[in-house]
Amino acid sequence: MSGTESPYGPTWYAATMVAVPERRTLTHDLDVDVCVGSLRHGHVKPHRSIFEAALTALDTGPEDAAMVGDSFADDIAGARALGMRAILLDRDGLHVDEPDRIDTLLALPAALGLTPS
């Protein structure tokens, strides 16, 4: 996503990394920058190597990335073990005590500290 396409101004850039089976990316018509498929990669989340592969492909480190996921065990714990910020997408309200959680993706820009320009 480029800054000119976003309501968050020209400095906004979101690099989307997906660490799911490739077929899921295709069936959901997702616009992603990097797809690390578990089938080809050989490991599934929360294995640290799948997160590392995505970060390497994006040319960034864990301190400059955020994982947003709906599985505490796979997405959140796996990302945090690597030192990434992890935001739980908790649509069903199962983890209300989780400090870094959202209940809808519409809340993600605010959770990341982004404001519309």
Image (cartoon, rainbow, N blue to C red):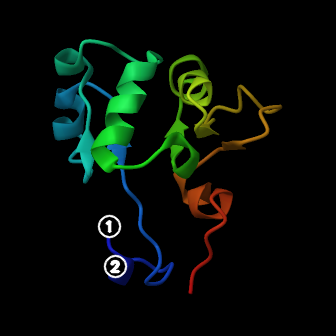
**What residue is at 47 percent from the left and 80 percent from the top?**
7
Q: Residue furthest bottom?
A: 117
Q: Circle 2 sits in a helix, a strand or a loop, which is it?
A: helix
Q: Examine the rendered structure and indicate whether residue 106 appears above or below residue 53.
A: below
Q: Residues within 10 Å of mark 1 (few under 14, many from 20)?
A: few
**Distance from the alpha carbon under mark 1 to that under mark 2:** 7 Å
The amino acid type, in three-letter code, at marker 1 is Met
- Which mark is drawn over residue 38? none
- What is the quadrant of the C terminus in the image? bottom right
Q: Position of residue 53 (x, y in %)?
A: 32, 31
Residue 63 shown left or right of residue 17 in the figure: right
Q: Examine the rendered structure and indicate whether residue 69 appears above or below residue 94.
A: below
Q: Nearer the viewer, residue 56 or 101?
A: 56
- What is the quadrant of the N terminus in the image? bottom left
The amino acid type, in three-letter code, at marker 2 is Glu
Residue under label 1: 1
Q: Position of residue 39 (x, y in %)?
A: 20, 16
Q: Circle 1 sits in a helix, a strand or a loop, which is it?
A: loop
Residue under label 2: 5
Q: Position of residue 47 (x, y in %)?
A: 44, 15
Asked if residue 87 can be seen in this view, the reply is: no
Residue 80 shown left or right of residue 75 in the figure: right
Q: Examine the rendered structure and indicate whether residue 107 appears above or below residue 53.
A: below
**What residue is at 41 percent from the left and 61 percent from the top?**
14
Q: Are marks 1 and 2 in contact (CB under 8 Å)?
A: yes
